[in-house]
Image (spheres, rainbow, N blue to C red):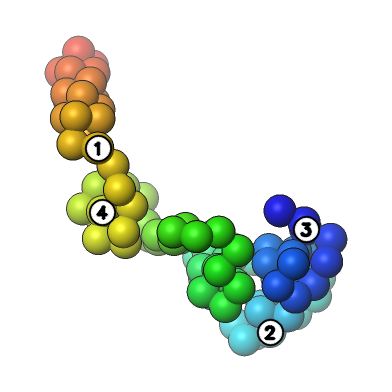
Amino acid sequence: MNDNIDGEEGAFSIQNIVRMSLIYNKYPTEWHGTSSISNVMRDLNKVYLPYSNFRIVHFFDGMIYLDKILKAGCQVPKKRIQSTLSKDFSSIKQEK
């Protein structure tokens, strides 16, 4: 990823971030929160598509939902999902 060129070659460059931020009324030198920068990065990804099959998924409530990731088109092998969920649930049981 070339982050020093604007336009398609530097999809997530600071120049493109500043330009896209104007849509959200954020001007150069103004600070982005997590929500606004997530929107900017999502929009830049939609405009330039720098990587094939790459999606940005938002989780604004602090929880990560596997079904939302899968709905976005992320392919995760079922075996890996099951082992990950089993590991996560076992660690939750141990914490109690």
Distance from the alpha carbon under mark 3 to that under mark 2: 19 Å
Q: Earlier in the sequence, mark 1 or mark 4?
A: 4
Residue situated in front as seen by the camera: 80 or 33:
80
Q: Secondary structure at mark 4?
A: helix
Residue 77's disc number: 1
Q: Secondary structure at mark 2?
A: helix
Disc 2 crowd rating (10 Å Cα; few below 14, some 14-19, many 20+) is: few
The residue carrying mark 3 is 3
Q: Earlier in the sequence, mark 3 or mark 2?
A: 3
Between label 1 and label 2, give the one nearer the viewer. Answer: 1
Q: Residue at x 68, y 67 (%)?
A: 11
Q: Position of residue 7 (x, y in %)?
A: 75, 75
The residue carrying mark 2 is 22
Give the residue type at disc 2: Leu
Between label 1 and label 4, give the one nearer the viewer. Answer: 1
Distance from the alpha carbon under mark 1 to that under mark 2: 39 Å
> Which residue in the rendered view is the most extreme toward the top?
94
Task: Say whether residue 92 is visible.
Answer: no
Residue situated in front as seen by the camera: 17 or 48:
48
Q: Secondary structure at mark 3?
A: loop
Give the residue type at disc 1: Pro
Q: Residue at x 50, y 60 (%)?
A: 52
